[in-house]
Image: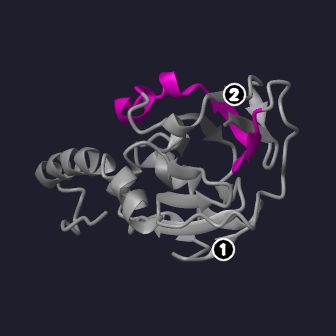
């Protein structure tokens, strides 16, 4: 996503930029469709779940953060809470460290470093978005630890971010974990616990 305005804190330009950002968020699925043309079935997620009684496969998404679990419908940004970007879940992080929840490949890191697109080895397409409207920080407080095209394992460190800076700048730290191709799956089961630690089971995806 490109942001031509390099001074996003000017009030007038900030409003215009936020509108542009909201519109561009709907192009994430197009990014996936253009970048992801091949799925390698030879490398499956090393964290597997047993077949269900009905014979359907289950795929796990582990938690990329330590924090409080929040239902997607309760997120303050309607771009995500309505499910138009795909089904998923949110976490209010306790720490400013993000780890990979799956095995796969980093296909897109936003220039502002607040969001990642990941292609999982088992076919899922993930968007991880740190904070609400944090694109307005223009990358301040975010340190990417991987690059576009990197292969990643479960638990690979992806990002460090400054929770206090985000909060003190007036933004929520709520982090979204979205399956952008969720329509391909029959069910997405959320962890119903209140709190979660890194690498605990967050979502179960049913084929």
Q: Are the two marked residues, 1 and 2, in contact with CB atoms closer than 8 angstroms?
A: no
- Asked whether residue 133 appears in the rendered view, the answer is yes
Residue 50 sits in quarter: top right
Total count of labels: 2
Residue under the image location 78 percent in, 48 percent down: 198
- Eyeballing the image, is 206 above or below 46? above
Residue under the image location 50 percent in, 59 percent down: 117
Percent position of residue 100, x then y: 69, 59
- Eyeballing the image, is 159 above or below 93? below
- Asked whether residue 174 appears in the rendered view, the answer is no
Q: How is the image coloured?
A: one colour
Please tell me which of labels 1 and 2 falls first in the chain: 1
Magenta span covers which residues?
56-82
Is disc 1 placed on a helix, strand or loop?
A: strand
Residue under the image location 73 percent in, 45 percent down: 63
Quadrant for the N terminus in the image:
bottom left
Is disc 2 placed on a helix, strand or loop?
A: strand
> Which numbered dot is residue 118?
none
Percent position of residue 43, x then y: 75, 66
* Disc 2 target residue: 189
Question: In the displayed image of the protein, which residue is found farthest to the left?
Answer: 12
CA gap, disc 1 and disc 2 = 26 Å
Q: Nearer the viewer, residue 28 or 134?
A: 28
Horizontal placement of 19 versus 156: left or right?
left
Horizontal placement of 101 versus 83: left or right?
right
Residue under the image location 72 percent in, 61 percent down: 103
**Magenta run includes residue 176:** no
* Disc 1 target residue: 151
Question: In the displayed image of the protein, which residue is found farthest to the front?
Answer: 55
Circle 1 crowding by C-alpha within 10 Å: few under 14, some 14–19, many from 20: some
Percent position of residue 83, x then y: 44, 30
**Magenta run includes residue 81:** yes
């Amino acid at each position: 996503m490109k942001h031509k305005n390099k001074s996003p804190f000017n009030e007038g330009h900030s409003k215009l930029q936020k509108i542009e950002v909201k519109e561009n968020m709907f192009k994430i699925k197009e990014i996936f469709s253009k970048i992801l043309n091949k799925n390698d079935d030879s490398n499956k997620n090393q964290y597997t779940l047993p077949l269900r009684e009905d014979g359907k496969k289950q795929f796990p998404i582990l938690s990329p953060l330590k924090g409080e679990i929040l239902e997607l419908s309760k997120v303050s940004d309607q771009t995500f809470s309505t499910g138009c970007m795909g089904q998923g879940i949110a976490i209010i992080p306790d720490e400013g460290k993000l780890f990979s929840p799956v095995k796969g490949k980093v296909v897109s890191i936003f220039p502002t470093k607040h969001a990642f697109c990941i292609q999982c080895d088992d076919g899922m397409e993930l968007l991880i978005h740190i904070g609400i409207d944090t694109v307005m920080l223009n990358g301040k407080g975010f340190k990417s630890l991987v690059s576009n095209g990197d292969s990643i394992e479960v638990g690979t460190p992806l990002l460090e971010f400054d929770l206090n800076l985000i909060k003190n700048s007036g933004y929520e730290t709520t982090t979204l974990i979205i399956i952008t191709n969720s329509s391909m799956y029959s069910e997405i089961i959320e962890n119903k616990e209140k709190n979660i630690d890194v690498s605990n089971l967050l979502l179960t995806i049913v084929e």
